Image (cartoon, grey):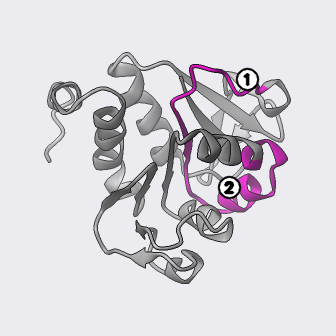
């Protein structure tokens, strides 16, 4: 199971394209609304997530949590007790934690990037506290996966599928979508 957390002001492409690719790869995904039943993206696209944050329970079959960027969505995710619990629990269990755009800053503030290679949206590098900041489009270091932004979402989603399944499945999904890599 993969949980994708959505808060008002999330970057729609980063969240929805990631969910779409994961589901095409037949990976169970649950979207989690932080703060309200209907979540408005950074570009005022409204989404009704699968569950509310008050309904979230960390399941034994959880494999990954995903934090899309966008503003003020990233700030809202970081303030959420539920999101912080999910991050802490995933870290404790050694599960994948994936963040894109501004969202890697949340991991930086929590001290999870110390000594790890990571990337983010330009201008947020100083928030990746004690990380080895990379300009790569997608970075995997241990259980942490980071990416730079909306333009890197298919590479990001590819890596998530590759981590959860395998490269062949990830390649097949993106090839069927006519995504150039």
Give residue 27's position: percent from left, percent from top: 42, 20
The kind of secondary structure element at disc 2 is helix
Give residue 151's position: percent from left, percent from top: 34, 57
Q: Residue at x 47, y 47 (%)?
A: 14
Disc 1 marks which residue?
A: 51
Vertically, is 142 above or below 50?
A: below
Please tell me the numbered disc located at residue 151: none
Q: Which residue is drawn at 76% across and 56% down?
A: 76
Give residue 70's position: percent from left, percent from top: 58, 58
Vertically, is 73 above or below 59?
A: below
Q: Residue 73 or 105: which is nearer the viewer?
A: 105
Mark 1, other Cα within 10 Å: few <14 / some 14–19 / many ≥20: some
The kind of secondary structure element at disc 1 is strand
Vertically, is 173 above or below 16?
A: above
Question: Which residues fall within the magenta stretch?
Answer: 56-84
Q: Is residue 75 magenta?
A: yes
Give residue 25's position: percent from left, percent from top: 32, 21
Q: Residue 67 or 13: which is nearer the viewer?
A: 67
Query: What's the CA distance linking mark 2 and mark 1?
Result: 17 Å
43 lies left or right of 170: right
Mark 2, other Cα within 10 Å: few <14 / some 14–19 / many ≥20: many
Q: Which residue is drawn at 72% across and 52% down?
A: 77
134 lies left or right of 15: left
How many discs mark residues in the rendered view? 2
77 lies left or right of 146: right
Q: Which residue is drawn at 37% across and 16% down?
A: 26
Disc 2 marks which residue?
A: 73
For residue 143, say whether it is visible. Answer: yes
Q: Residue 46 or 92: which is nearer the viewer?
A: 92
- Labels 2 and 1: the sequence-earlier one: 1
For residue 7, say whether it is visible. Answer: no
Q: Are marks 2 and 1 in contact (CB under 8 Å)?
A: no
């Amino acid at each position: 199971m993969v949980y994708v957390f959505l808060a008002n002001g999330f970057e729609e492409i980063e969240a929805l394209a990631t969910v779409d690719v994961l589901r095409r790869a037949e990976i169970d995904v649950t979207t989690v609304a932080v703060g309200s039943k209907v979540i408005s993206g950074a570009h005022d696209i409204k989404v009704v997530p699968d569950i509310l944050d008050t309904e979230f329970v960390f399941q034994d079959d959880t494999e990954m949590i995903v934090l899309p960027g966008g503003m003020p969505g990233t700030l809202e995710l970081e303030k959420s007790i539920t999101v912080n619990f999910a991050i802490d629990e995933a870290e404790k269990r050694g599960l994948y934690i994936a963040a894109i755009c501004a969202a890697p800053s949340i991991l930086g503030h929590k001290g999870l990037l110390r000594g790890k290679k990571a990337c983010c949206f330009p201008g947020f590098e100083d928030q990746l506290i004690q990380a080895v900041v990379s300009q790569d489009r997608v970075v995997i270091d241990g259980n942490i996966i980071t990416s730079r932004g909306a333009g890197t979402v298919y590479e990001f989603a590819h890596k998530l599928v590759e981590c959860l399944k395998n490269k062949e499945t990830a390649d097949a999904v993106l090839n069927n979508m006519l995504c150039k890599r």
